[in-house]
DNA sequence: CTGAAAGCGCTTACAG
DNA sequence: CTGAAAGCGCTTACAG
């Protein structure tokens, strides 16, 4: 076995040393160096020390992860695919909490976390990113129905888990009962006596539009969670004799307080001004509350607002926001662990993710 | 060349096909299949179509990223190392904005983004994670001086850029003038006439402690940005004849509104109650404002507050927060592009990152 | 326009 | 306790 470079002293700043070179420097086989790193019990402590010593001297930082990955047949990372949503919404506390949950699961399993998001410009660049991702599996977070990126993930034939999303192939699903949760939010308002309501909606499709939404667009919404929440609201409306299609729905193009404020303004400017607003996220709800304040309306006296998510900001709002709690971080953890289990060939049990209405101060009877 | 499995119809759900198998199915060499994916100009469109057709039939999703990475000598991803901060602070808008900037840079370069954070439990698990990260380089975000994870990154001898951090080796640095920026914040308050001040500090070391900070701890702070901001405040204090060490500093263990509130409460409970508070982040400042409100104090009439960061929440606060603006997203973008340039062997020009005081409504003369 | 050959850096039974 | 051998899946000059 010949070695290039060889074992001088000092560290070569440019080329990095290889395992083979370390082996040559110590005078053992590559297998032994590999064992020093991967199977300490396979060699004497003294020899192992010599190996490490040589590695240090040569500036060898341990086996190359890419080569090891190829040899072992696994990349050592899990991929997370998310829509542009998150990109903006790296500022969306809910999405961020979710990511944190996945990250815990990855950590537990000693895996890295590779982020793949849809680039702002559409195009095939992103599909390529999915193909180029050195990962052992994917968790796909809230992509619209029929998104080509999801197809790209499925085509890789790696284990995948789908979150807040329509079922595809045999990939396991993680999510909450959005319809039931939304319904409970609406029922709360209805139970308080409200009959003039407005809805502030999240993006309905991959090409979100800000503004009021017609029946056609409601039906063709491609984000599963938004579609289900709309359905849940509608079910509650119908149950008290309201015609769901008559309840105005304002779609926000991004999930931010600013957009929620715009939605609130639009809703409050309506002829039969709503006495209550259902928002599909807390960010949007907070924005609607700001709109009310700007219009000189008091929450909850003049306007009731109910959110969705129960992010930390909700409890801190003034008044504190009544909302539907959903366990974002647990959702991420569950999705991550599910994927890890799949990678190991285990069939894990699915944890049920519960939601619950959290009644705080932002909703009251109309005209109270 | 023999092929296992061979080219039947239908898709094998378990084992994924290899390039070699596709080549065998088409009756060409592996090189040609590789060219079909990587160098379309190297073969006729018709043949290329036949290759893709066979790939589709066999369920081959394109060259394996890990193998390609080994062969090409690059992993195709950049690693981001951050302290636990971000883990909590996946909820820290500033950190999240920074991440978004890096993510843009990675996208531009067609690289993935691999997250490596310090696990909550200390220990060597994280050092291993650095060693196992299949990346071409690292950007290291705001780690404390002497952190072993940074050592681990440096030992990998990959290109690295350091952000908000003390210089190490020859890695380029990205950051703002924290000292000058902090000084301008303090000078604003001093200029308004305040002489009884309090400081709400970010974590000072990797082992953050909530509570008032003594001179010893101030001197031994290991987070560069916090240390520099402390110095900037002190310089401004000294310039008007205040004794810096007499100004109370309350350290927050995490960068959240809740911690800021606790700090605010502690500061407002002091014998000579401060008339103004300097917070090292907007989140902390927002918390301090809440503490004032809880104490029945009006901002800015009874208490002035100045933040740091200028996250979107700052402008939306009530009253809007006077703060130091820093370009978080641009900082991430700059760090990412710098790393990408290094990977390509280019020597990029460093963009200066400017800060500026943004005067809004949360600071006024004392007793106004 | 296409193929044969070498090799990226490592790990893993297996034999000794 | 240690080593020889095979090979993970691909890409890249190079020759034809």
Image (cartoon, coloured by chain):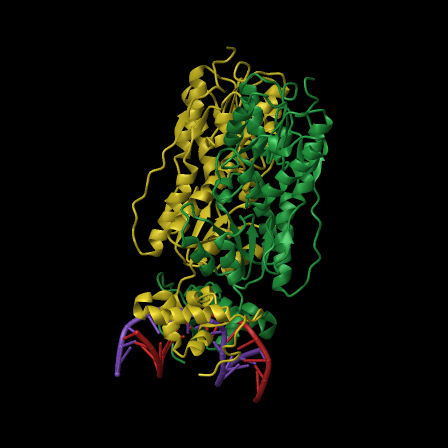
Chain colours: A green, B yellow, C red, D purple
Using the rendered view, name the quadrant where residue D13 is placed: bottom left
Expressed as whole percent of the image width and height from the top left, the position of residue A104 reads: 60, 51
Total numbered circles: 0
Judging depth in this view, the residue of A146 and A22 nearest the camera is A146
Expressed as whole percent of the image width and height from the top left, the position of residue A289 reads: 58, 25
Does residue B152 appear left or right of residue B122 in this picture?
Answer: left
Q: Is residue B86 above or below residue B300?
A: below
Using the rendered view, name the quadrant where residue A221 is placed: top right
* Residue plotted at (62% across, 35% down): A312
Q: Is residue A200 above or below residue B36?
A: above
Q: Residue at the far right: name it.
A: A191
Expressed as whole percent of the image width and height from the top left, the position of residue B355 reads: 38, 31
Does residue B213 appear left or right of residue C6 in this picture?
Answer: right
**Quadrant where the N terminus of chain A lies?**
bottom left
Judging depth in this view, the residue of A114 and A31 nearest the camera is A114
Expressed as whole percent of the image width and height from the top left, the position of residue A196 reads: 64, 25
Q: Is residue B179 above or below residue A271?
A: below
Does residue A117 appear left or right of residue B356 in this picture?
Answer: right
Judging depth in this view, the residue of B103 and A184 nearest the camera is A184
* Residue plotted at (68% across, 25% down): A194
Tell me, yes or no, if residue B188 can be seen here.
yes
**Quadrant where the C terminus of chain A lies?**
top right
Tell me, yes or no, if residue A19 can be seen here.
no
Judging depth in this view, the residue of B137 and B16 nearest the camera is B16
* Residue plotted at (35% across, 56% down): B343
């Amino acid at each position: 076995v010949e070695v290039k470079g060889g074992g001088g002293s000092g560290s070569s700043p440019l080329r990095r040393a290889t395992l083979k070179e370390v082996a040559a420097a110590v005078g053992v086989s590559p297998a032994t160096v590999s064992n020093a790193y991967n199977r300490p019990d396979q060699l004497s402590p003294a020899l192992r020390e010599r190996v490490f010593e040589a590695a240090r001297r040569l500036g060898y930082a341990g086996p190359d992860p890419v080569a090891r990955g190829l040899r072992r047949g696994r990349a050592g990372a899990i991929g997370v695919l998310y829509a542009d949503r998150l990109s903006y919404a790296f500022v969306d506390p809910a999405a961020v909490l979710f990511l944190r949950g996945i990250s815990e699961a990855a950590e537990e399993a000693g895996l890295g976390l590779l982020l793949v998001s849809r680039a702002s410009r559409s195009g095939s660049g992103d599909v390529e990113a999915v193909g180029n991702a050195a990962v052992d599996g994917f968790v796909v977070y809230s992509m619209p129905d029929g998104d080509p990126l999801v197809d790209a993930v499925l085509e890789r034939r790696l284990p995948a888990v789908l979150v807040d999303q329509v079922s595809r192939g045999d990939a396991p699903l993680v999510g909450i009962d959005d319809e039931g949760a939304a319904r409970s939010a609406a029922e709360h308002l209805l139970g308080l006596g409200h009959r003039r309501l407005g809805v502030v909606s999240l993006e309905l499709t991959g090409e979100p539009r800000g503004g009021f939404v017609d029946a056609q667009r409601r039906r063709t919404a491609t984000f599963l969670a938004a579609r289900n929440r709309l359905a849940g609201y509608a079910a509650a409306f119908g149950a008290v004799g309201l015609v769901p299609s008559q309840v105005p729905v304002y779609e926000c193009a991004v999930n931010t307080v600013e957009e929620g404020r715009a939605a609130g303004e639009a809703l409050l400017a309506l002829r039969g001004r709503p006495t209550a607003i259902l928002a599909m996220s807390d960010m949007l709800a907070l924005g609607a509350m700001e709109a009310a304040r700007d219009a000189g309306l008091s929450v909850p006296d003049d306007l009731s607002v109910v959110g969705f998510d129960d992010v930390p900001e909700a409890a801190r709002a003034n008044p504190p926001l009544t909302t539907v709690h959903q366990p974002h971080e647990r959702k991420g953890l569950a999705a991550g662990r599910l994927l890890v289990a799949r990678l190991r060939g285990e069939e894990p049990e699915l944890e049920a993710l519960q939601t619950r209405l959290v009644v705080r101060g932002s909703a009251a009877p109309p005209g109270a």
